[in-house]
Image: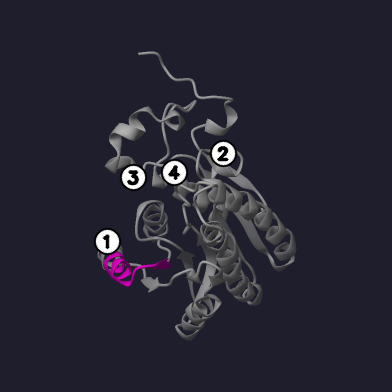
């Protein structure tokens, strides 16, 4: 059976950096995205860049509607991998609903449910399928791409912050229950990342407080990918752990903004 890493949400930004990290290291990669056309374009580009490994894209959406996770689609994904002789030895849960602009007195309850269902319930369903196969094949590694907002709130992101806090609780519970099968479960907690939003909104990000970190820099996708790689490839005796990648933002009471 052929081994591979599965990376969700890997058509843009951090997901791309994670896929490229594993491909550069000679690992086969399966990645997902919501939009079929974008998945096909990304798959072609990945294959052109990394011809020596096998890279497979798969289009999948997390929800049928705000209240219903598409569990059947997840089963079909793993049935397809089984039929193709692919074993997912590492699962990287990168895809997320960002829950932007979530205002308590304006957004309907279904918006809150959509974020929690995507970031918690859908990820649990993915873990369930992957872990079942890891158990049969001697173990594996699962990494959640979480967020430092699990501990530090920012405005108008209530659902996202709740989902990331809940996700960490789920991570620890999974680590405890799956440890006996040699399945390690950990989380990477990025802070602000230089994504396409950073590039498209330079005026906003020029003065946003989160950019003023103790290291005086903000993470790029490769920083997150390196942390994921550590957990899957090096942290043999580590499970239920969190690795923060935010330039030290979480340790400071408030950002120290230089005076102009």
Labels 2, 1: front one: 2
Question: Which of the pair 21/189 is nearer the observer?
Answer: 189
User: Is disc 1 surrounded by few (<14), some (14 to 19) or many (20+) residues within 10 Å?
Assistant: few
Labels 4, 2: front one: 2
Question: Which of the pair 237/113 is nearer the observer?
Answer: 113
Mark before the other along the chain sequence, 1 or 3: 1
Does residue 11 lie above or below 55 as drawn?
A: above
Residue 207: % across, % down: 37, 27
Mark before the other along the chain sequence, 4 or 1: 1
Q: Quadrant of the C terminus?
A: top left
Per the image, the residue denoted by label 2 is: 153
- Residue at point 43%, 72% (across, down): 60
In the rendered image, the residue lying farthest to the bottom is 83
Labels 3, 4: front one: 3
Mark before the other along the chain sequence, 3 or 2: 2
Labels 3, 2: front one: 2
Residue 183: % across, % down: 65, 64
Labels 4, 1: front one: 4
Does residue 69 lie above or below 175 as drawn?
A: below
Does residue 70 lie above or below 195 as drawn?
A: below
Per the image, the residue denoted by label 4 is: 223
Per the image, the residue denoted by label 1 is: 49
The magenta region covers 28-43
Q: CA distance from mark 4 to mark 2?
A: 22 Å
Q: CA distance from mark 2 to mark 1?
A: 38 Å
Per the image, the residue denoted by label 3 is: 197
User: Is disc 2 surrounded by few (<14), some (14 to 19) or many (20+) residues within 10 Å?
Assistant: few
In the rendered image, the residue lying farthest to the top is 259
**Residue 146 visible somewhere in the drawing:** no
On whether residue 36 falls in the magenta region, the answer is: yes
Contact flag, marks 4 and 2 (Cβ < 8 Å)? no
Q: Secondary structure at mark 3?
A: helix
């Amino acid at each position: 059976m052929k081994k591979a890493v599965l990376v969700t949400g890997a058509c843009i930004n951090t997901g791309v950096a994670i896929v490229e990290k594993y491909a550069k290291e000679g690992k086969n990669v399966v990645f997902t995205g919501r939009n079929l056309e974008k998945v096909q374009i990304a798959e072609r580009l990945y294959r052109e860049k990394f011809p020596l490994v096998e890279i497979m894209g798969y289009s999948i959406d997390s929800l049928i509607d705000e209240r219903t996770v598409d569990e059947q689609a997840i089963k079909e994904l793993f049935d397809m991998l089984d039929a193709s002789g692919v074993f997912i030895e590492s699962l990287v849960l990168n895809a997320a609903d960002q829950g932007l602009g979530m205002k308590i007195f304006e957004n309907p309850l279904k918006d809150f449910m959509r974020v929690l269902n995507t970031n918690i319930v859908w990820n649990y369903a993915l873990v369930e399928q992957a872990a079942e196969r890891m158990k049969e094949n001697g173990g594996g590694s699962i990494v959640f791409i979480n967020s430092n907002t699990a501990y530090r709130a920012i405005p108008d992101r209530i659902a996202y912050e709740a989902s990331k806090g809940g996700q960490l609780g789920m991570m620890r519970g999974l680590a405890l229950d799956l440890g006996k099968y040699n399945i390690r479960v950990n989380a990477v907690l990025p802070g602000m990342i230089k994504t396409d939003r950073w590039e498209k909104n330079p005026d906003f990000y020029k003065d946003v407080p989160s950019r003023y970190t103790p290291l005086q820099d903000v993470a790029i996708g490769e920083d997150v990918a390196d942390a994921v790689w550590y957990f899957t490839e090096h942290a043999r005796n580590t499970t239920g752990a969190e690795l923060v990648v935010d330039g030290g933002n979480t340790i400071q009471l408030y950002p120290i903004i230089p005076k102009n």
